[in-house]
Amino acid sequence: MAIRAVLRMGDPRLLEPARPVARCDTPELHELIADMRDTMAALNGAGLAAPQIGVGLQLVIFGVDHNPRYPEAEPVPYTVLINPILTPIGEETEDGWEGCLSLPGMRGLVPRYRNLRYRGLDPHGDAIDRAVSGFHSRVVQHECDHLTGILYPMRIRDLRDFGFVEELFPGQDVADD
């Protein structure tokens, strides 16, 4: 398949709401998913939303096994999630450092729901319904924000907790995005 260019913050397409996927299990959809997976893997991403590669559809992929960008993160199963619906489980939130392939070299401290239920469809149109917590919950929320035109800096409470990796974490071996 192909590695696609990732749009960067400032591109107006990242701010547009995505459209629902009308049909699953089509050759075009499978090709798009393969391109997204290749792109995410090439950049060592934890996830990728279709709008990040200029495709305005409600489609995200995510998954972390042994990712050099997230050496401390617990594993998150590789998932293709179409037309997602997120429901917080409780009100508990936690702050965590996030990066984004659309903001290379930057990090921000972002509040997210600790526990989450997400529902949607897989590439074949079969239902997905999971309750998750921690890093898994954070990754899903981050990726699904892209579907409504939200980038993580928009969620940062204090912009003193946002900046370039090398300035925020001097001397530390932290991935660049």
Image: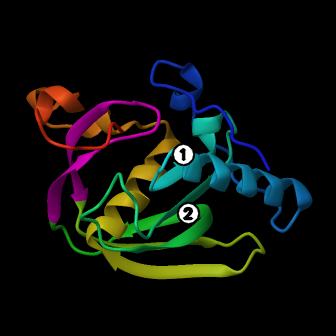
Q: x, y (%) of residue 55? A: 70, 39
| Residue type at tag 2 | Pro
Which residues are drawn in magenta?
A: 93-112
Q: Is residue 152 visible?
A: yes
Mark 2 or mark 1, which has the lower sequence index?
Answer: 2
Q: Residue furthest right?
A: 27
Give the answer, above or below, for where 103 lies relative to 72.
above
Residue at image mark 2: 84
Dots 2, 1 in contact, CB < 8 A: yes
Q: Residue at x 54, y 49 (%)?
A: 48
Q: Residue at x 47, y 50 (%)?
A: 45
| Residue type at tag 1 | Leu
Cα distance, mark 2 to mark 1?
9 Å
Q: Residue at x 21, y 44 (%)?
A: 173
Query: In the picture provided, is 170 more to the left or to the right than 38?
Result: left
Residue 101 included in the magenta stretch of the image: yes
Residue 92 included in the magenta stretch of the image: no
Q: Is residue 158 visible?
A: no
Residue at image mark 1: 147
Q: x, y (%) of residue 98? A: 28, 46
Identify the main secondary structure in magenta. Answer: strand
Q: Quick one: 152 or 91, which is closer to the camera? A: 152
The circle on residue 75 is none
Quarter of the figure with residue 92: bottom left
Scheme by which the image is coloured: rainbow
Give the answer, above or below, for where 140 lies relative to 174.
below
